[in-house]
Amino acid sequence: MFLVYLSIGLYFLVFVLSLLSYLLGSLKRLTTFLMMLAFLVYITYVIRLGIEVKSFPFADVYGFYSLLGNGMLFFLTLLSLKLDYIRRFLVLFAMLGVLWTLLLIPAEPSPYRSTLYSLHVTFALFSYAFALFGGFSSLLRLFLESKLKHKTLQSFFLPLNILRSAERFSIGMSFIFFTLTLVFGSLWSRSFFGKHWINDPKLIYVLFLWVYYALLVHLNLLRRIKPRSFSYGAITGMVLSILGLLFVRHEL
């Protein structure tokens, strides 16, 4: 667990330095470097644990949430290298990093020694991550469009074309990864339970999300949905995904 505590310490150091950077107007490169180093230490622990258990490293929601949160933070940190205004939120990202990494302490190693199970959970992680990014991009786009319309936008600015591309790409990728989640979940279920489908609440909810994103993606491809309605659909999908993450549990 040394690497876990080291990652937490690095995230907390980024939090402190980010606060100082607001006062000093410097330390930006250092905070970004330490943020990426914290994730590198974190993912090193996860990979090492996965090698030890010879499967996806975790079997409960704590590990899943921790990986999902840290993965999204890493992606946002990479974006901050290109988009400087995202770097303003590093102080928030660092504190979230501390909280999400703390979830590894009660997380339990996976008892399933199966490549199919590992792929099933890994694709589920990407599914939810893209669903959250897509909804957040849509929410931010609608907010900025409203500010521009009323001419109340002052200091914060993000190109709308980037957000439009981000929401469409994220929703498309979410649909693809939900598809792969179900495919490999079915294959793992066949090898472990002897049948391709089990009436597990989590799997049923993932199937519901797959149908929802399939409709949203195809309506967009066929141009049967307006851009604003598509954004509302992406936000709704984000909310549905969060509800699934928080309240729907496996019964296995």
Image (cartoon, grey):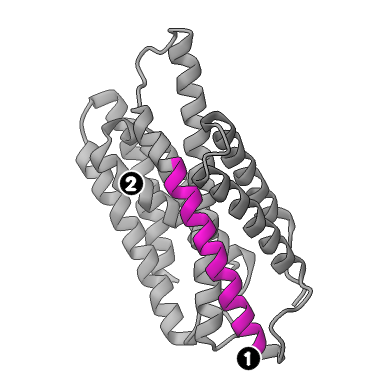
Please check the rendered image and state whether residue 185 is part of the magenta-colored stretch, yes or no. yes
Q: Position of residue 151 (x, y in %)?
A: 43, 7
Q: For the N terminus, which image quadrant?
A: bottom left
Viewer-proximal residue among 197 and 45: 197
Query: Is 179 on the left or on the right of 24, as rendered?
Result: right
Q: Position of residue 135 (x, y in %)?
A: 54, 41
SS under mark 1 = helix
Q: Identify the residue under disc 1.
A: 191
Q: How many discs appear?
A: 2
Local packing at callout 2 (Cα closer than 10 Å; few below 14, some 14-19, many 20+) is many
Question: Which secondary structure is most common in the magenta stretch?
Answer: helix
Labels 1 and 2: the sequence-earlier one: 2
Up-down relation of residue 115 to residue 57 (above or below): below
Q: Residue at x 51, y 26 (%)?
A: 142
Comparing 215 with 117, the one in front is: 215
Helix, strand or loop at label 2? It is helix
Q: For residue 161, what is the image quadrant?
A: top left
Residue annotated with mark 2? 77
Q: Give the range drawn in magenta.
A: 167-191
Left or right: residue 204 versus residue 226 is: right
Residue at 29%, 57% in the rendered image = 37
**Residue placed most toward the observer, 249 or 105:** 249
Where in the figure is residue 208, as x and y percent of width and height?
70, 58
- Of 14 and 78, nearer the camera is 78
Relative to 87, say whether 70 is above or below: below
